[in-house]
Amino acid sequence: MTSAASDADARARHDRAFLGHPAGLGWLSFCELWERFSYYGMQALLVLYLSNYLFLPHNVGQVAGIDALRHAIESVTGPRSPQQLASVVFGLYVGLVYLTPIFGGLLADRVLGRTRTVVIGALLMAAGHFLMAFETALLPALGCLLLGVGCFKGNIAAQVGDLYAPGDRRRASAFQIFMLAVQVAVVAAPLVCGTLGEKVGWHWGFGSAGVGMLIGLVVYLAGRRWLPPEAPRGAAHAAEVRPPLDRRAWQQVALLVALIPLLMLSIVGNQQYNNGFPLWSQQHMDLTVAGFQVPVTWLQAVDALLSFGTMLASLAFWRWWATRRREPDEITKMALGCFVAACAPALLMIPALAIEGSGARISLAWSFGYALVNNIGFANIMPVGLALYSRAAPRGLQGLMIGIYYLHLFFGNSFVGWLAGLLEVMPGSRFWGLHAVLVLAAAVGLLAVKFLFGRVLAPDEAPAPSPAR
């Protein structure tokens, strides 16, 4: 690096201006909040918009390219009704969201740098949201959104990691703070974009998502001076910026890729809350409170609020722990999180057995119990995993490896969708017991990785930054 870049990097790594973290973390987190607001706002509306309006027989002909897409889908699945077609298109979109960050990471690592790639991603996403205002432009709009998320998602997370020296143990809590911004967006986006879309007009909802993305871009550009410095460009710096991978670096890459199946298993209990659990709840849960029928979708808002609270509690706990004992590394934290998260589907075996015994509906309190226990564990899985991949990835490959990290969400959600189908052929107690075993297996697997290969992913120790005076 140049001397100026090195000086800027040193200042950023020792900065404690934002909740004991570098100021750049605040700017990146606030930007991520608005990007996730736009993403979840659009996602909340998309399947409803497609099934209730755009894919109806008298509207679907307006969509450019829909005949070719429908033919491709139905050649695999057979004829699809408007609702079924909407579900397939929605599933393809959500799945591809977790594949495109790999290519965005490569683009940033090898060609453009993170800042330019993030800006391009934000502009593409804003364009995609605004294109949703035109029925004919659905497919180009979804294409812009997928490319934009690919450019944005992994690279902004990589910039969070770049704020910290390799041995700085604040990194894990930094990603928990970063994920707190996501939880705020998960609560707010359906309330704002969803209400506008359903009560005022679809295009108002999509437009509000686009405005949110533009706000996020403005926040990102306003905070550029606090972001980690870009790696120098050009052949003269290539060896320094992206040195050849030595044996340990190749081992790190191989081990990070090999962790994906364990990470996939670690999230099945969490992701089932959005898939199989609502279906099971509407069949077996008493959702009437003081004469009011609680919508099943409201359970998602409860989950988001509990997730926000447990993330704060986890941050406070590890900060307290660090003042008294050595803080564990990322893999240990993730394994502990999996042990706790496995208790959530295990907890549901109790009401499931009661249902099988008496057939009576169960209390709404079981939903709170499931969400609370699950989110205590999940607070130490997803954000800590991001911290691990941003730190342990070899120099020059951080963006790519974070893109690979998101693959576990692609595979995990696909697996969860298949598991949810077992509700029709398996008693609830066995269904939730299976999920508990799968998450528990992830915990055991992570501990095995820790004991067998821990040194490969161990951080290079660096002195903790001294408090600012």
Image (cartoon, rainbow, N blue to C red):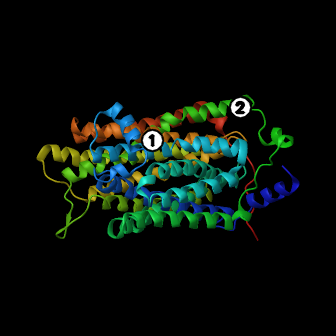
- Secondary element under disc 1, as helix, strand or loop, is helix
Which numbered disc flags the more N-terminal residue, 2 or 1? 2
Task: Count neighbours of disc 2 (C-alpha within 10 A) and say few if under 14, some if 14 to 19, many if 20 or more.
Answer: few
Q: CA distance from mark 2 to mark 1?
A: 26 Å
| Residue for badge 2 | 248
Q: Position of residue 197 (x, y in %)?
A: 37, 65
- 69 or 421: which is nearer to us? 69
**Residue 300, placed above or below residue 454:** below
Q: Position of residue 259 (x, y in %)?
A: 54, 35
**Residue 287, placed above or below residue 389:** below
What kind of residue is marked 2? Arg
Residue at image location 82% in from the left, 44% down from the top? 234
Residue at image location 35% in from the left, 49% down from the top? 61
Q: Is residue 399 visible?
A: yes
- 289 or 4: which is nearer to us? 4
| Quarter of the figure that contains the C terminus | bottom right
Q: Are marks 2 and 1 in contact (CB under 8 Å)?
A: no
Task: Count neighbours of disc 1 (C-alpha within 10 A) and say few if under 14, some if 14 to 19, many if 20 or more.
Answer: many
| Residue for badge 1 | 266
What kind of residue is marked 1? Ser
Quadrant of residue 267 in the image? top left
- 336 or 2: which is nearer to us? 2
Q: Position of residue 450 (x, y in %)?
A: 57, 36
Q: Is residue 173 visible?
A: no
Q: Position of residue 232 (x, y in %)?
A: 80, 48
The answer to whether 135 appears left or right of 432 in the picture is right
Q: Mark on residue 215?
A: none
- Secondary element under disc 2, as helix, strand or loop, is helix
From this viewpoint, which residue is outermost toward the top?
247
Residue at image location 16% in from the left, 43% down from the top? 356
From this viewpoint, which residue is outermost toward the left?
358
Q: How many marks?
A: 2
